[in-house]
Amino acid sequence: MSLHDDLLKHQIFVQRLIGTEIKSIKESLDLLRRRAISGASNGIYGAALKNLLRKAISGLPDTAISNMVDIATYESKFSAEMFAKYFSQSSIKNEPTSAMIALNLDDTKEELKILKEAFGDAKQFLGSYKGSLETSYEVPINGTKKLLEIARKYNQESTLLLTKDKGAQLLFTKDKSKVALGTFTKVGKEQPSTESWTKDVKTGQYYVTKEIAPVNSAALDKLLRTKNMSINYLVGGQKAPKKSLETAYKQFSQRKADDITQVITDARLSNLSKLDIEAAIHERINGLITTQSSTLAQTAINYTTNVARMATMEANPEVPDNVLWTADLEVNEHCSECEELDGNVYARSEIEEPPLHWGCLCSIEPTEDKPS
């Protein structure tokens, strides 16, 4: 099983999300339908009718963005789990025997006090190492966890001044050499960093493992509201400006309200009966608008999952900088642009995440392969 296989299986779940979003949009359209029929029956027309219908469907963008943020948050967590599974370990062949720890207190006595509490004797640390970590102490590898716990305790109770980011630089060394093999661990008031030093029992090798973290929902919310989708499409033969997901939903809502207003206006001018006007409303919503709703949902979900995945890649330097582009050619079988990109590897900085067009189901994933 590879990352690519796991993500392809995940697309089945994404398809279910699309179905759920289509249902959510249809609920808003049903409210629009009811208000339109009510307005037409009560003789409301012109600007008053347009305002009534726009208000009826005005909640769709906020509902959609809320749904998308939930989906993006889930997708980021899922991506982080997958990336951790395939990219978070770097092996070190030799078992380390000691570590360098920089406490960086102003008073050496205070530093020795912490070391004594951790190891029962501070004399062995008096020959401190002075180098890139300023004053550091070489400590036994099997006592670093206890040392960090004690350092955190002092940090909470007094004025333990550690290195930058309220952390202590913990560099694992091999055979008492001063060559860093390894890691950075926070020991400030916050929780320790998610890095750990573990041993593979099968190979006997040690690993530095960094937990790949998802992106928080607030950052994803901002992305979905402000970042413009990389969709190419034409209006009147001209390339239309790119827009954010929120803008797309707002325009969809307003245009559908205006569309139904026009249907009712045209029906009145044709002296159609109330039943005929109601039938015209049903026909328009069940026809073109429903098709457009499906396309919007498909595009929105795909955009959201790719934005979340890309943001998770960018937030975690452990993840490779290159991405593999995968096109769903069963859905977009007539799209030459998607077909041309399918299977190619690109530098992450050189591309925008899919979709490329309305209804596009292309996706991206990190890869250690070199660009095509």
Image (cartoon, rainbow, N blue to C red):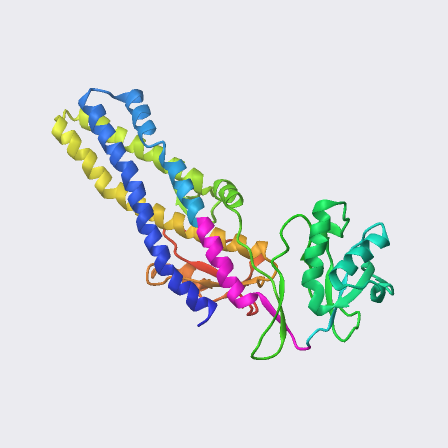
Residue at point 48%, 55% (across, down): 77
Residue 307 versus residue 344 in the image, above or below: above
Q: Judge by depth and name the residue closer to the eye, 30 or 356.
A: 30
Q: Which residues are magenta?
A: 72-94
Q: On the picture, is 3 further left or further right than 148?
A: left
Mostly what secondary structure, the magenta segment?
A: helix
Residue 48 percent coordinates (x, y): 30, 20
Residue 290 percent coordinates (x, y): 26, 43
Residue at point 23%, 24% (across, down): 39
Q: On the picture, is 83 further left or further right than 19?
A: right
Magenta segment includes 91:
yes
Magenta segment includes 331:
no
Q: Judge by depth and name the residue closer to the eye, 208 or 353.
A: 208
Residue 20 percent coordinates (x, y): 31, 48
Number of numbered callouts drawn: 0
Q: State which quadrant residue 206 falls in.
A: bottom right
Q: On the picture, is 243 further left or further right than 317?
A: left
Residue 364 versus residue 191 in the image, above or below: below
Residue at point 83%, 67% (across, down): 124
Q: In the picture, which quadrant includes the N terminus?
A: bottom left
Q: Judge by depth and name the residue closer to the eye, 212 or 152.
A: 152
Q: Is residue 160 visible?
A: yes
Q: State which quadrant residue 319 falls in.
A: bottom right
